[in-house]
Image (tube, helix red, strand yellow):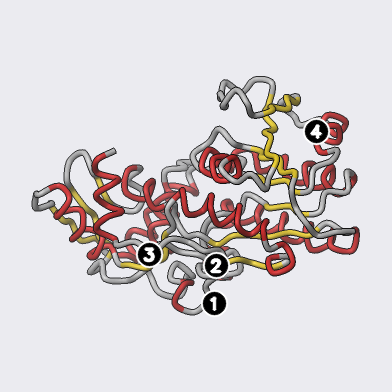
């Protein structure tokens, strides 16, 4: 069976990352791209994109029908829907799909300290990784992407310590620990370009980043882009972790983002994977740009 990938279907194309993946494939005439969406989804797509509608619980028969003739299934489903990814993988294998890309976009999935600190975030992803390795024997290959936090959202959502509206920043300790981040468009391009070289990206983790920088460096660029000095608060990292864990123990899920910030600002939790993993930036022809340019784009938008 040829390893060439041409027909691609994207799940979760209406989320934060999905539109960038869809755009990248749609812009390349090598691919025929379509979308799989739940019946209840309110997301809209370009009129020329074929949309396969399935029930909200992703029925097996409907998945199999949508996956017929597909070479690759790209999953960008939200964490809240991760419970369905197992059924999606099983259907992809039954339909003889060649490649599956799981919704694993984020940090170093194999970092044991991070997995132990925030099992609620890692358990489903680790189960997915195990299942995909088992499916290799059935002919289903996989590619998983380590991207770090999505760069734009790491600034605008506030979970990495930046409050763009109020021009405030919260640093854990001194704010000088570096972590890897990737722009949304670069992730989309990486996924698409990985499908152009399927033999080089099969059954492996792909490590990419737009920048590996510290909160201090990001703040310097933010102050340039906003022409304003920001207020900075320093918080003890271990106390921050303690509060996050206490919140989660009481069912307060706001503790999750606190622990994610901790994992990316304390050494040993894999946030700085680009410093010790082999980068695939060049293999996937990812663009190079300055931090100042990228931050300015976020501020303008």
Tell me how far mark 3 sits from mark 2, CA to CA: 12 Å
Pick whichever of labels 4 and 1 is earlier in the sequence: 4
Q: Residue furthest bottom?
A: 276
Pick whichever of labels 4 and 2 is earlier in the sequence: 4
- Residue 207 marker: 2
Tell me how far mark 2 sits from mark 1, CA to CA: 7 Å
> What residue is shown with label 1?
278
Q: Is residue 222 above or below residue 36?
A: below
Find residue 136 and report its horizontal and vertical position in percent. Answer: 84, 62
289 or 18: nearer the viewer: 289
Crowdedness of circle 1 by 10 Å Cα count: few (<14), some, many (20+)?
few
**Taking 253 as reference, is 29 left or right?**
right
Q: Is residue 40 above or below residue 92?
A: above
Pick whichever of labels 2 and 1 is earlier in the sequence: 2
Find residue 95 and report its horizontal and vertical position in percent. Answer: 88, 43
> What residue is shown with label 3?
211
Q: Are marks 2 and 1 in contact (CB under 8 Å)?
A: yes
> What residue is shown with label 4?
66
Q: Secondary structure at mark 1?
A: loop
Tell me how far mark 4 sits from mark 1, CA to CA: 35 Å
133 or 183: nearer the viewer: 183
Q: Residue at x 28, y 46 (%)?
A: 297
Tell me how far mark 3 sits from mark 4, CA to CA: 37 Å
């Amino acid at each position: 069976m040829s390893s060439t990938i041409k027909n691609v279907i994207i799940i979760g194309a209406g989320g934060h990352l999905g539109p960038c993946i869809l755009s990248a494939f749609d812009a390349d005439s090598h691919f025929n791209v379509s979308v799989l969406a739940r019946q209840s989804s309110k997301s809209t797509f370009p009129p020329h994109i074929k949309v396969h509608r399935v029930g909200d619980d992703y029925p097996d028969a409907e998945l199999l029908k949508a996956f017929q003739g597909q070479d690759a299934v790209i999953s960008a489903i939200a964490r809240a829907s991760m419970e369905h990814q197992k059924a999606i993988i099983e259907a992809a294998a039954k339909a003889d799909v060649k490649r599956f890309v799981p919704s694993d976009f984020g940090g170093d999935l194999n970092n044991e300290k991070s997995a132990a600190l925030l099992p609620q975030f890692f358990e489903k992803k680790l189960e997915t990784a195990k299942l995909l390795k088992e499916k290799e024997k059935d002919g289903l290959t996989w590619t998983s992407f380590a991207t770090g936090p999505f760069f734009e959202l790491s600034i605008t959502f506030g979970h990495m310590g930046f409050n763009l509206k109020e021009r405030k920043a919260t640093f854990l300790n001194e704010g000088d620990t570096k972590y890897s981040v990737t722009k949304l468009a670069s992730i989309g391009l990486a996924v698409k370009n990985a499908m152009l070289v399927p033999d080089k990206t099969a059954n492996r983790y792909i490590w990419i980043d737009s920048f590996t920088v510290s909160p201090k460096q990001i703040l310097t660029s933010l102050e340039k882009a906003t022409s304003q000095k920001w207020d900075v608060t320093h918080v003890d990292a271990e106390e921050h972790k303690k509060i996050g864990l206490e919140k989660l123990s009481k069912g307060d899920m706001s503790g999750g983002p606190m622990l994610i910030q901790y994992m990316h600002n304390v050494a040993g939790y894999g946030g700085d994977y680009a410093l010790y993993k082999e980068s695939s930036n060049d293999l996937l022809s990812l663009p190079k740009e300055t931090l100042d340019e990228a931050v300015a784009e976020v501020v303008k938008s």
